[in-house]
């Protein structure tokens, strides 16, 4: 099962807080096995309540919390794009959503940096 954008984001923020999956489950009140399945992509589309419980202990920056909530409802988002955006905090939430919403012909996807650059130009925002 390939990792999802949501799984990638949850795992990244959990590991940044140095929680094991089991510790994180105990703290958040969300079953650790369910968290593991979210992180590995076996499960998608968690409830809003589950996401809120996880975010309470992950404590991501506001933009990243918005991204995680968005990813919970958009499981097909390209994980490479998610990783690029999480690594580049200057990319706004709106630019991320615009880039994630673009459909590509065939299986070819532009690299995330090019895609973000194009969407930034379309939105008329400065790319710092």
Image: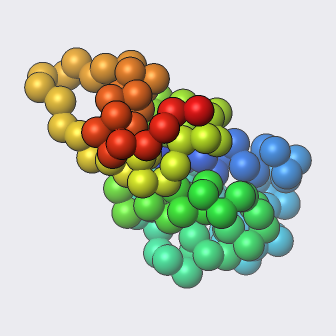
Q: Is residue 32 above or below residue 112?
A: below
Q: Quadrant of residue 120?
A: top left
Say which of 86 and 22 sits in front: 86
Say which of 34 and 112 sits in front: 112
* Spot occupied by residue 95 in the image (x, y as percentages of width and height): 41, 46
Q: Is residue 29 above or below residue 57?
A: below
The reply to whether residue 53 is in sight is yes
**Residue 106 placement, left or right of 41:** left
Q: Quadrant of residue 56?
A: bottom right
Quadrant of image for the N terminus: top left
- Residue at 72% in and 49% down: 13
The furthest residue to the right? 18
- Residue at 28% in and 22% down: 109
- Residue at 27% in and 46% down: 101
- Residue at 67% in and 68% down: 54
* Spot occupied by residue 84 in the image (x, y as percentages of width and height): 54, 31
Q: Is residue 126 above or below residue 58?
A: above
Q: Is residue 66 above or below residue 12?
A: below
* Spot occupied by residue 36 in the image (x, y as percentages of width and height): 62, 51
**Residue 118 placement, left or right of 79:** left
């Amino acid at each position: 099962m390939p990792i999802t954008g949501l799984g990638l984001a949850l795992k990244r923020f959990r590991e940044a807080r140095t929680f094991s999956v089991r510790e994180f489950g105990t703290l958040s009140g969300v079953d650790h096995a369910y968290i593991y399945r979210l992180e590995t992509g076996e499960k998608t589309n968690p409830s809003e309540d589950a996401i809120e419980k996880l975010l309470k202990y992950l404590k991501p920056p506001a933009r990243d919390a918005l991204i995680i909530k968005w990813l919970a409802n958009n499981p097909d988002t390209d994980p490479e794009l998610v990783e690029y955006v999480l690594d580049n905090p200057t990319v706004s939430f709106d630019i991320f959503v615009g880039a994630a919403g673009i459909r590509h012909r065939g299986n070819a996807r532009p690299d995330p940096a090019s895609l973000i650059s194009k969407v930034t130009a379309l939105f008329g925002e400065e790319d710092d």
